[in-house]
Image (tube, helix red, strand yellow):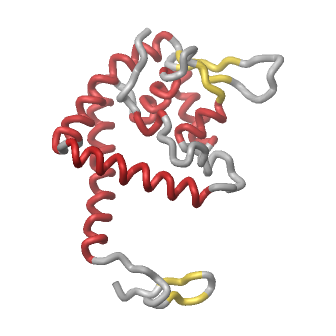
Amino acid sequence: MNERRASGGREATDRDVRWLSDAEQRAWRAFLEMQARLNAQLNRELQETSGLSSADFAVLVTLSEHPDGRVRVLELARGLQWEKSRLSHQLTRMQQRGLVDRSYCSEDRRGAFIVLTDAGRRAVEAAAPTHVAGVRRYLFDGLDERQVAALDAISRGTLDRIAAACAGHPDPIAAECDGAGAVTSADTTGEHVPPR
């Protein structure tokens, strides 16, 4: 690629930028298309079978993975890697549908808890098999053990490099770097829903 890009107020030359090779460019674009199409397909199937969006499901799974089904709003935003405003709108819609509730503690001023309701737990337990079946059908059924290990190594290595890059970032929501790339519950959506 011979394009020139602006960089720090000056024009970047080909010597300044490590452009992607043709093979890397193909892999990168295939990855982006795969991710977009996979997410869209899983979301479509989830909505058709359960009435839940992928955003609903991500929130419910995160809550279901906590023993008491309660998570602070800030912790939930960090785990999902969402802006607070996005999470607030999402939680309002889910609360109106009876999937989650808010709990306030007068002795603790660090903010509200989001609580998984019985209806929310039933919804995520009913939806999880469809989601997991889709993940298996579209991704893991096409991989052998070596490829699964490679996917895991690639993903964790990338998470480690992102964690190192955002260490010390001033925004605690935008920079969830603790655990040096540890996979959060939002990353494993649907693979585990605890029993009641």
Q: Is residue 66 above or below residue 38?
A: above
Indicate the position of residue 196 as horizontal and vertical percent values. 44, 9
Check the image and report above or below for 159 versus 111. below
Residue ID at (56%, 22%): 95
Q: Which residue sits at x=42%, y=29%?
A: 57
Q: How many marks?
A: 0
Q: Residue at x 50, y 37 (%)?
A: 184
In front: 61, or 47? 61
* Quadrant of residue 129 within the rendered picture: top left
Which residue is more in the foreground, 109 or 147?
Answer: 147
Q: Is residue 109 left or right of residue 74?
A: right
Q: Is residue 83 left or right of residue 148?
A: right
Q: Is residue 76 left or right of residue 136?
A: right
Name which quarter of the figure residue 72 lies in.
top right
Q: Nearer the viewer, residue 105 or 92?
A: 105
* Quarter of the rendering containing residue 179: top right
**Which quadrant does the N terminus fall into?**
bottom left
Whole-percent x, y for residue 114 in the image: 61, 23
Q: Is residue 30 above or below residue 36?
A: below
Residue 88 on image: x %, y %? 61, 35
